[in-house]
Image (cartoon, rainbow, N blue to C red):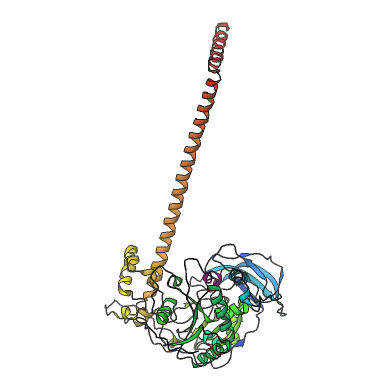
Amino acid sequence: MKSNRRIWPIHGGLNLPPHKSDSTAQAIVQAPVPPELVLPLHQHIGEEAKPCVEVGAHVRRGQLLAKVTSYVAAPVHASSSGRVSAIEDRPIPHPSGLRARCIVIETDGLDESVPGTGLGDFTAIDPVLLRAELRRQGLVGLGGAAFPSAVKLNRLPHHQVRTLILNGAECEPHISCDDMVMRERAEDIITGARIMMYMLAAEECLVAIETDKPEAIEAIDTAIARAQDSRLELVPVPTVYPEGGEKQLIQVLTGREVPADHLSADVGVVCHNVATAAQVKRTIIDGDALTSRIVTVTGGGVAKPRNLDVRLGTPISWLIAQCGGYTDKAERLIMGGPMMGFTLDDDSAPIVKASNCILVAAHDEVHAGGDAMPCIRCGECARACPVKLLPQQLYWFSCADDHDELQSHHLFDCIECGCCAYVCPSRIPLVQFYRASKSRIWQQEQERERAERARERFEERERRLSEQKLARKQRLARRRAALHEKGNGNKVQEAVERARKRRAAMRDEEPPE
């Protein structure tokens, strides 16, 4: 049911034009299966998956293609049936523009699937087994971060999770996939929410939806009423960017601030995306692996903006073709929104688990660039920052490459929302400076860790050699002591003396030259 819960405002933020009506004008469309699927082995936060199929193998939708062994990782499954035609480096959607290892499937048009094995009544199953199933089926957060869901749903002994938040505050312009999921799959979301509450032993679930999404609010409100679960609560929230950030949304709904270098669970809250909740239901109840997701394809540069249910691995060029192709206004291809997304240089890159939006932006749909001018110290960046940082100071320290000052000014609390750069009258690309500084600091930390590990290995080797040398001396001393105890010390000395005398006699008997 709808809530009268108090709402706490966030610091800063922006009121941005939504640009969502074009992509929400029609229902979600099922995208056709492309002739070729390209599935990167690394589609999530954590360790890269390792292939467990060979080139030439026939696979079906939902079949495991790449497995993982580390805790923070997610396996990769086939998105349709066909033949594995290659395991090779291909372009991937990443800010670096680099290529990465991918499994390529030549689809057969049959779209055969492995049998689904739903678990039935989740309340009769140990939460450990439910998490194991989510991990086995490759589920990650579908809000964009792609963090393995089983890890985030693991209730640690020192965490008392009271509140589960489902994030439907899709605040970035152009992106509307969560809005459409809430409109059309509200029952799945609420069922998934109840499963997640059971796994976390949470006392309540707050579903946060921005007030400019009346259709989604109505659909979720109806689904909550049907569930007849008093722990579920719908909370309309103001439309402010970047209110959908995890820490920002927690503050809006609960008034609690998550301290720097802490997890949301440390304040008794776990936050998941609404699309993730819907997939939890499909995985636990229906037995489906994560092989597709809803993607917004929009912008003035595409002929027919819409939301599509897309198989993972679908080339972006194929997906845009299903939306009528490019228009003559197309200027920039972005994965994500105009604020936090990144530019793609190659539209052959595939849709991955983190792909919530493909924005084919026209000139007037992205923040104006141009040559940066000197900072005029107006302070607009600090007023807009939702994390209460000092962007101007971070900019100066980034230019000076002063890592100590950057960290003392909490650079790593920056969520890279782009508010500071958006309001900067000097058009300084502030977020780019922060990202570059973070990368340099990470690299420096990694080099320091490598040096520390090398030092520790050297010291361990020296200690081991010293212990071995000491052990040899101690063994020799014990043997000598044992010989003396047995009364054999004189006999040894006599044998040594006899050998000396024999050598001297042999020298005396040698004929002169």
| Predominant SS along the magenta part | loop
Camera-side residue: 342 or 453?
453
Q: Position of residue 258 (x, y in %)?
A: 40, 73
Q: Position of residue 165 (x, y in %)?
A: 48, 79
Q: Position of residue 183 (x, y in %)?
A: 55, 89
Is 348 on the left or on the right of 209, as rendered? right
Is residue 305 something that shows in the picture?
no
In the image, is residue 150 part of the stretch drawn in magenta?
Answer: yes
Is residue 118 something that shows in the picture?
yes
Quadrant assignment, res 486: top right
Which range is magenta? 142-163
- Residue positioned 54% across, 93% down in the render: 25
- Residue positioned 66% across, 81% down in the render: 33
Camera-side residue: 450 or 134?
134
Q: Is residue 144 above or below residue 307?
A: above
- Locate the C terminus and report the quarter of the image it occupies: top right
Is 7 on the left or on the right of 66, as rendered? left
